Amino acid sequence: MKICCIGAGYVGGPTMAMIANKCHDIEVAVVDLNEERIAAWNSPSLPIYEPGLQEIVEERRGKNLFFSSEVKKYIKDADVIFISVGTPTKSYGIGAGQAAELGYVEGCARMIAEVCEGPKIVIEKSTVPVRTAEVIKSVFTGYDKGHLFEILSNPEFLAEGTAITDLDNPDRVLIGGDSTETGKKAVQTVVDIYNRWVPRENIITTNVWSSELSKLVANAFLAQRVSSINAISAVCEASGADVDEVANAIGKDSRIGPKFLKSSVGFGGSCFQKDILNLVYLCEHFGLADVAEYWHQVIKINEYQRKRFTRKIIHSLYNTLKGKRIAVLGFAFKKDTNDTRESAAIYICRDFIEEGADIAVYDPQVDAEEIKGLTSEKVEVCGSAAEAVAGAHAVLVLTEWDEFKTLDYTALYESMVKPAHIFDGRNILDLAELEKIGFNAFGIGKA
């Protein structure tokens, strides 16, 4: 069997690397028109940082795992084709700001239809709106090749920073397909691939529409929990409660559970906001205005939390940041990834630059060019936390990297302008200990 994955991004690269690692007899090719990205996948320095990914790629690359910009060649030769391209939120026209841009998906479908002459299984791996398979099928039909393809949905449920663990031991794999005989056969083919290492009871099969919608709903529910605890964090600060203690208490309820109840400056990443906005647009399309507004509120609370954090900092620094050095520790949207998409750090840095602050950023994985490109060329990108904090009026912890939990904060305090402030945007620090050192310490949801 030969597998081709179109799209060498955060989903396609790690997923195909895991399949190649588990199925040595299957040839797996990851293709992309971006030659620079393909070159990075073929180099010692991968374009994506995920714990464990480098080792798997180096083990299988050149054996049964290949990265290439020869897109049409590998599409034509493949038995199974994964579509794993971006579906960003539209920035223009109908649905702007909410609907998913499906141009890349359509482009993949047209390319597949142009070059393929025999039967193929085509799998949506990208996060797409419900009934996107219908769009792909209409493209194939337009080329008079609809009978050659079975279209399946196999959404990813990876958490960045733990993607390899999630792929190696997933709590579920979801595969949606048609109920026709050929559809069932195609679904079974993909089931058999995953069943090489995933227990059959963890592989769920549904119709295509259920599979497509399940991805959006899963992310919406997870983001909803984050926004819920973040909304409660404001109540905690006003009332004297401690949000971590509240979260621990309610998380002990088996009906609720402890996951995704960590108050913070807000969720980021490529999925939550994009997918919720997509769900909002879908609800509006079906005339479900109240349902759309319910889910939109999850986004609004996330924005509120970020702005509330920013206002707290400005107020604590005597309502002016002009000429003050602000040290930002962490720029990725979460630890163990170099992904900055929708990171709270971007918006906070931009707000502070407008307020006249001098920003110094340290992140162990994000490149300096990316940080400057997302904020300003004036931002100082440092090689260590100590370098960023030296001479600063305030420290902001915006990514929960493990190294930030164990820094020598006594030494950092001594290098700062007094009074020194520290703002824990991820609730990972012991505020009482920081206050003993001399910091004016603030943690979200703590009075």
Image: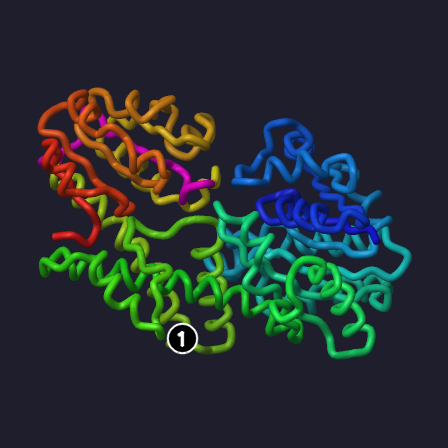
* Numbered marks: total: 1
Q: Quadrant of residue 140?
A: bottom right
Label 1 secondary element: helix
Q: Amino acid at mark 1?
A: Val
**Residue at figure coordinates x 11%, y 37% from the top left:** 435
User: Percent position (x, y) of residue 13?
Assistant: 64, 44
User: Percent position (x, y) of residue 401?
Assistant: 37, 39
Q: Which residues are drawn in magenta? A: 317-336
**Mainly helix, strand or loop, the magenta region?**
loop
User: Percent position (x, y) of residue 267?
Assistant: 37, 52
Name above or below for residue 228 compared with residue 352. Answer: below
Q: Which residue carries the number 1 mark?
A: 291
**Residue at figure coordinates x 26%, y 62% from the top left:** 248
Q: Could you tell whether 71 is left or right of 342 in the image?
A: right
Q: Could you tell whether 202 is left or right of 243 in the image?
A: right
User: Percent position (x, y) of residue 136?
Assistant: 72, 63
The colouring scheme, among rainbow, by chain, secondary structure or one colour, is: rainbow
In the rendered image, residue 31 lying in the magenta stretch gets the answer: no
